[in-house]
Amino acid sequence: MEKSKGMIETENRQGIEKIDEVADGIYHVIYPDDRKLGLAMIRFAEFYESPHFQGRNFTFQDYARWYLANSQGGQKKGKFTYYDDWPGFNLPSRTLEPFYNGEFDPLRRGELELLDSFRHKRGEKFYIIASSQEATPDLIRHEIAHGLFDMREGYQREVLRVLKEERRSGNPAPDRLRNYLLNMAGGVGYAADKLLDEEQAYLVAYDDILADGLDTPDMRKIHDRLMPIFDRFFITKE
């Protein structure tokens, strides 16, 4: 992984450990644990990519009730398992605007902290990825792949070409992965317009595919095609 290109200093931190610029315009926000991470990121992330709340105004309580009723963990355990289910987050800077504009008031403490950390960059195009300090390199690679997909037109164009070619060739792996993503955590994970981005991120960072028994020669073939693209765009500054 490329060395950090810089750091944003935040004053009076309550949850954020540090913020590193891991590539041009891609900022990694690091929290001490998954609970503080999830508490801060939940409304930003679900406004961006939830299959139910995308583009909508909602409170934390609205989301928690829905997740408890619809997630696999909620249905099987009767518990709010969000902080265990989602150890990494990603979102483009444009997602922050409704929060800056007061559409999600009252803001929670972790939301205010994140907004204050990037207030000086308001109006610029950048990308936020977030994890706890315990995140694995593979998880961070997954989130960086999202950042590249949004911030680097060449990266997006090349990975979409690979996925399209593999589907046209009859490779069943992309559709198998898509079905997995649609059913993840009981189907509460991703809006339809985020699925291609998720496919490429899971295929670049392969640990989840291995852990969940999805590894096949067809799946690994796509991984092997995508990794050189990731390495080229992540290392090279634009």
Image (spheres, grey):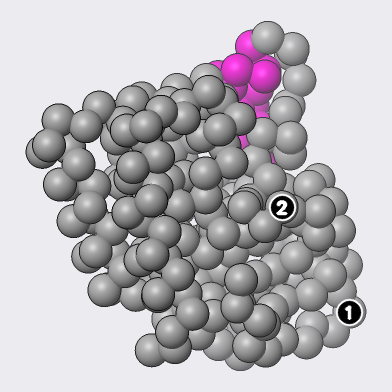
Magenta part of the chain = 60-75
Question: Do tag 2 and tag 1 residues touch (Cβ < 8 Å)?
Answer: no
Residue 236 visible in the picture: yes
**Label located before the other in sequence (2 or 1):** 1
Q: Does residue 41 appear left or right of residue 217 in this picture?
A: right
Quadrant occupied by the N terminus? bottom right
- Prevailing secondary structure class for the magenta stretch in the rendered image: helix
- Pointer 1 residue: 12
Furthest toward the front, the residue is: 217
Furthest toward the top, the residue is: 76
**Based on the displayed image, in which of its 4 quarters is residue 4 positioned?**
bottom right
Residue 30 vs 165, above or below: the answer is: below
- Pointer 2 residue: 136
- Closer to the camera in the image, 40 or 29: 29
In reply to whether residue 73 is colored magenta, the answer given is yes
Q: Does residue 36 appear left or right of residue 211 in this picture?
A: right
- Residue that appears at 84% across and 63% down: 15
- Closer to the camera in the image, 76 or 100: 76
